[in-house]
Image (tube, rainbow, N blue to C red):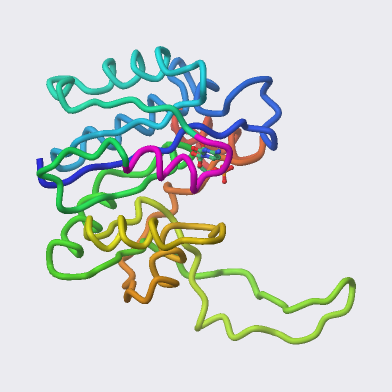
């Protein structure tokens, strides 16, 4: 395929405090990773590289093969690193030769609808070097120093960044080679390397499961409860 999705799932889940790696925590009868991969495999056809916690590669492969349906031949599993950036780099090393568009997606954004993937792929294929799905910021944001409020920040200039983030392959690989510090996401790393990044619409369901309150929200959404 001309598209690959790197699904980073190697986080420890410290803030979720579920007693193990977050990707393998259940939402319903299916794990966070399984839900994330269902969205990936419902999206346009792509190589899918799952970046697993060390020691859990076999479990990650089982999850991926179960979610893949008739796309089992598109699954790769690699071992993650100490930081998210290290994990993405490990995933990029497994890209197949014909891939031209690379998406990087947090497994923790387990309920991301497949149309977000399609929007990001379309924007890269239309010529963008980097593409970032965003949501408007609804809260009023303040600049603070300790407990002192310094200033309000103009909300119209802000957007909340989600994944999957998409890039031209050459752009992402050269930016990763050039990166000499840790960035909070791939769009920031690519922008620091001098490439323009444009936005597409994100989706509220692409929220990141970080805390137990987020997990409760995901469980309610999957159960069909009003949230
Ligand atoms: O910790 P946080 O939820 O922000 O991590 C975002 C995503 O990056 C998660 O899907 C997590 O599994 C992944 N990650 C990783 N390797 C790390 C740290 C985080 O793959 N070392």
State yes or no: residue 82 in magenta: yes
Along the horizontal axis of the image, is 201 left or right of 152?
A: left
**Where, by quadrant of the figure, is residue 187 drawn?**
bottom left
Quick one: quadrant of the C terminus? top right
* Magenta stretch: helix, strand or loop mostly: helix
Q: Nearer the viewer, residue 109 or 222?
A: 109
- Residue at 63 percent across and 69 percent down: it is 139
Along the horizontal axis of the image, is 201 left or right of 14?
A: left
- Residue at 42 percent across and 18 percent down: it is 57
State yes or no: residue 44 in magenta: no
- Most extreme residue toward the right is 147
Along the horizontal axis of the image, is 72 left or right of 83?
A: left
Q: Nearer the viewer, residue 204 or 20?
A: 20
Q: Nearer the viewer, residue 195 or 157?
A: 195
Looking at the picture, how far across and down is residue 72, in whole percent? Answer: 18, 20
Quick one: quadrant of the N terminus? top left
Q: Nearer the viewer, residue 164 or 153?
A: 164
**Where, by quadrant of the figure, is residue 144 drawn?**
bottom right
Looking at the picture, how far across and down is residue 189, in whole percent? Answer: 44, 63
Q: Is residue 117 above or below residue 183?
A: above
Q: Is residue 26 above or below residue 162?
A: above
- Residue at 37 percent across and 59 percent down: it is 202
Range covered by the magenta-colored residues:
81-92
Looking at the picture, how far across and down is residue 31, in whole percent? Answer: 46, 22
Looking at the picture, how far across and down is residue 143, in whole percent? Answer: 73, 79
Along the horizontal axis of the image, is 220 left or right of 169?
A: right
């Amino acid at each position: 395929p001309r598209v690959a999705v790197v699904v980073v799932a190697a986080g420890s889940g410290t803030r979720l405090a579920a007693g193990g790696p977050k990707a393998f925590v259940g939402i319903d009868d299916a794990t966070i990773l399984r839900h994330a991969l269902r969205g990936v495999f419902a999206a346009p056809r792509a190589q899918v590289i799952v970046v697993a916690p060390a020691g859990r590669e076999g479990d990650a492969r089982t999850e991926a093969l179960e979610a893949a349906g008739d796309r089992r031949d598109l699954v790769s599993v690699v071992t993650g690193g100490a930081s998210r950036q290290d994990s993405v780099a490990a995933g990029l090393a497994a890209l197949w030769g014909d891939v031209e568009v690379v998406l990087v997606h947090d497994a923790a954004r387990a309920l991301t609808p497949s149309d977000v993937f399609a929007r990001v792929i379309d924007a890269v294929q239309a010529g963008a070097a980097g593409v970032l799905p965003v949501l408007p910021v609804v809260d009023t944001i303040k600049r603070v120093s300790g407990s002192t409020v310094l200033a309000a920040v103009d909300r119209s200039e802000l957007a909340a960044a989600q994944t999957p983030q998409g890039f031209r392959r050459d752009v992402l690989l050269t930016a990763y080679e050039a990166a000499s510090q840790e960035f909070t996401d791939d769009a920031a790393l690519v922008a620091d390397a001098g490439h323009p990044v444009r936005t597409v619409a994100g989706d509220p369901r692409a929220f990141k499961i970080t805390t137990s309150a987020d997990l409760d929200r995901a469980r309610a959404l999957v159960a069909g409860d009003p949230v």
